[in-house]
């Protein structure tokens, strides 16, 4: 089994959590090239490219300018990202065995780094999938990564039994030839809904929390079968057999 989640927009450069080791990202060379290309932009440029305010643009301009500084030490990805999903994973209480299991079973997407393992050392950045870099042939980051990631992704899933638990946001499919992924491995996608006036609705913040909580559940409990995912419950969300279907496990509050 492999598990798959999205990166976060918010990051930190420091953590007191001890990890068994720090690994090098598989696509480190590509990430360094991407960072070098992003460093050419002014804060104003980044504001337009990334659709962010002037404060965030200035912060990320500085991040890219300092990306290669020897004082800018990399931090394991699972600790560096601080979005809702990662807060709910809560790696602060992970044991060494938990970190090692996560390293073997979890992928995190990244528009800068492509695909990351939890203990891959990364530096702070911000990037979006629709950004086009002239040095990349003026294609989007989605299209830049697709031919590089697809074969590697499929091979790693097959190496771990051929089953993918997909807890990433929908846009991350565009980093891959997703139709091919679905043909070559079994993809299980948990979905989280709130019932309102007899209808199912997605509440984004709850969906993100559930993805984080389920990721933690899988890693802590060493879940490897889709059937065992059905036991997941959190804050009233529970598996709904009637709403689920082929490749979809629906959890309703």
Image (cartoon, grey):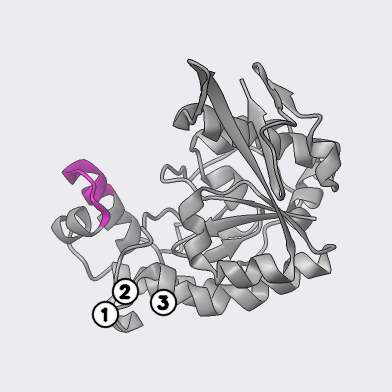
Disc sitting over residue 234 in the figure: none
Pointers 2 and 3 in contact (C-beta within 8 Å): yes
In the drawing, does residue 191 fall left or right of residue 245?
A: left
Decide which of tag 2 and tag 1 comes sooner along the chain: 2
Residue 34 on image: x %, y %: 39, 72
Q: At numbered mark 2, what does the secondary structure look like: helix, strand or loop?
A: helix
Disc sitting over residue 33 in the figure: 3
Question: How many numbered discs sit on the rendered protein?
Answer: 3
Q: At numbered mark 3, what does the secondary structure look like: helix, strand or loop?
A: helix
Q: CA distance from mark 2 to mark 1?
A: 9 Å
Q: Is residue 30 magenta?
A: no
| Image: 197 above or below 75 | above
Residue 74 on image: x %, y %: 53, 57
Decide which of tag 3 and tag 1 comes sooner along the chain: 3
Q: Which residues are magenta?
A: 50-59
Q: Badge 3: few (under 14), some or many (20 or more) residues near its Cα, within 10 Å?
A: some
Q: Badge 2: few (under 14), some or many (20 or more) residues near its Cα, within 10 Å?
A: some
Q: Which residue is mark 1?
A: 134
Pointers 2 and 1 in contact (C-beta within 8 Å): yes
Give the quadrant of residue 92.
Answer: top right
């Amino acid at each position: 089994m492999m598990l798959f989640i999205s990166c976060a927009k918010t990051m930190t450069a420091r953590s007191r959590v001890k990890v068994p080791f720090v690994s090098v990202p598989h696509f480190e060379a590509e990430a360094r090239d991407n960072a070098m290309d992003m460093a050419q932009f002014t804060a104003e440029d980044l504001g337009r490219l990334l659709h962010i305010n002037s404060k965030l643009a200035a912060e990320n301009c500085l991040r890219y300018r300092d990306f290669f500084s020897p004082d800018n030490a990399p931090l394991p990805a699972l600790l560096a990202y601080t979005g809702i999903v990662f807060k709910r994973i809560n790696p602060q209480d992970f044991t060494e065995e938990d970190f090692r299991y996560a390293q073997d079973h979890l992928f995190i997407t990244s528009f800068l780094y492509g695909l990351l393992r939890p203990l891959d050392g990364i530096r702070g950045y911000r990037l979006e999938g629709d950004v086009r870099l002239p040095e990349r042939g003026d294609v989007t980051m989605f299209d830049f990564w697709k031919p590089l990631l697809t074969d590697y992704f499929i091979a790693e899933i097959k190496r771990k039994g051929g089953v993918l638990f997909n807890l990433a946001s929908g846009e991350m499919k565009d980093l891959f030839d997703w139709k091919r992924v679905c043909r070559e491995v079994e993809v299980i996608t948990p979905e989280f809904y709130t019932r309102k006036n007899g209808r199912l609705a997605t509440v984004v913040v709850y969906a993100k929390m559930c993805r984080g909580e389920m990721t933690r559940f899988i890693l802590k409990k060493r879940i490897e079968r889709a059937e065992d995912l059905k036991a997941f419950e959190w804050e009233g969300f529970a598996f709904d057999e009637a709403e689920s279907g082929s490749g979809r496990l629906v959890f309703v509050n």
